[in-house]
């Protein structure tokens, strides 16, 4: 990917900051886009930043020659439930316009453009706790009945990407290869960074709990202690995005992939936090709406397709995540 031209939307978010750093280290020419100015963590990197509303900015992107698009910009789950129309505008219309731009450029310049899309376990929807517990590790095509606007948006955008990657412009399919967006998506579990504090995600109870404990702040967890979904260290999320980007198209059996790492309960998160920070004040105060959302997500996912197709394997299991990544880094961050 050396010296490729890359667009990263939502570059100021948790994933965006880490991804931009990784791309810059690879020597990519990076253009970033976000509502916010660049944060300090990536401000010194050699990137061109376009600040403003994505939906209103897409026409400007037609002037750039992008080889790869990482479309990270999104209205996250908690906010999307409150402002559903705005979430649809950002999550769906923004994605649609970028896919249209990718299709236009792919056809005009006779080259595929890789379109990398971070989807989410929110695309799943389990009907009740019993079904969730009985389902085990869920495959990509099971239980695709999301209960939230965010999940509906993500699932629909997956389908839009598949359409643009396989069926758009049927009259051009006799080209060899047909020049259409090369759409690839990862359904991420909850992601945890030691460097950035999350906001707006329904899976954020885990990282919020840990950051609060490290800072000596009380934290009331918004889900029950027995709540369980899959999580992943942020470095593994970035690794997965880059691995999927680099994978030869002919090796991929699908366009949307699960990836997984570890799946602790909220009680187990609390026990880890108390072991590291014995004075931590962590209680449980479940929010019925947010609890219902997390209860609709699987306890864990089956990532065998990613492992078989592009060699996916996380670097961090639960123990290594806490002992070698999160705790050492967060102690440095908060000078503990």
Image (spheres, grey):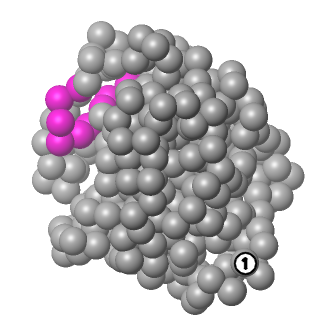
Between residue 92 and residue 293, name the one nearer to us: 293
Residue at the image point whose x is 63% and y is 39% from the top: 272
How many dots with numbers? Answer: 1
Classified by dominant secondary structure, the portion drawn in magenta counts as strand
Location of residue 185 with respect to 294 vertically, above or below: above
Q: Which residue is mark 1?
A: 133
Taking 53 as reference, is 25 left or right?
Answer: right
Taking 143 as reference, is 152 left or right?
Answer: left
Residue 36 drawn in magenta: yes
Residue at the image point whose x is 58% and y is 89% from the top: 127
Residue 302 drawn in magenta: no
- Residue 198, horizontal then vertical, whole percent: 37, 43
| Residue that sits furthest to the right in the current view | 308
Does dot 1 land on a helix, a strand or a loop?
Answer: helix
Quadrant in the rendering for residue 61: top left
Q: The magenta stretch spans which residues?
A: 29-38
Taking 243 as reference, is 194 left or right?
Answer: left
- Residue 208, horizontal then vertical, whole percent: 42, 44
């Amino acid at each position: 990917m050396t010296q490729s031209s890359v667009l990263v939307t939502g570059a100021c978010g948790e994933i965006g900051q880490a991804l931009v750093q990784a791309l810059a280290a690879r020597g990519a020419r990076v253009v970033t886009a976000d509502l916010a100015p660049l944060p300090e963590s990536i401000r010194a990197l050699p990137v061109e930043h376009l600040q403003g509303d994505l939906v209103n900015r897409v026409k400007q992107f037609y002037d750039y020659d992008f080889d790869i698009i990482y479309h990270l910009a999104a209205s996250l789950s908690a906010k999307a439930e409150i402002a559903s129309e705005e979430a649809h505008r950002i999550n769906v219309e923004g994605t649609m316009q970028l896919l249209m731009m990718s299709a236009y450029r792919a056809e005009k310049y006779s080259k595929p453009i890789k379109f990398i899309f971070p989807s989410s376990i929110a695309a799943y929807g389990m009907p009740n706790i019993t079904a969730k517990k009985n389902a085990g590790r869920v495959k990509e095509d099971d239980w695709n009945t999301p209960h939230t606007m965010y999940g509906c948006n993500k699932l629909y955008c997956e389908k839009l990407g598949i359409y643009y990657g396989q069926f758009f412009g049927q009259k051009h399919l006799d080209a060899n290869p047909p020049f259409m967006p090369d759409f690839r998506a990862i359904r991420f579990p909850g992601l945890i960074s030691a460097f950035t504090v999350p906001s707006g995600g329904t899976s954020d109870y885990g990282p919020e709990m840990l950051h609060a404990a490290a800072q000596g702040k009380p934290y009331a967890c918004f889900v029950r202690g027995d709540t369980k979904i899959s999580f992943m260290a942020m470095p593994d999320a970035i690794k997965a995005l880059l691995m999927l980007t680099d994978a030869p198209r002919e090796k991929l059996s699908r366009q949307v992939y699960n990836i997984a790492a570890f799946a602790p309960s909220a009680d187990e998160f609390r026990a880890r936090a108390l072991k590291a920070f014995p004075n931590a004040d962590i209680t449980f105060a479940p929010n019925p709406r947010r609890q219902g959302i997390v209860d609709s997500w699987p306890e864990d996912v089956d990532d065998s397709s990613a492992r078989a197709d592009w060699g996916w394997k996380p670097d961090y299991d639960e123990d290594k995540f806490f002992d070698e990544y999160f705790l050492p880094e967060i102690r440095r961050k908060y000078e503990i």
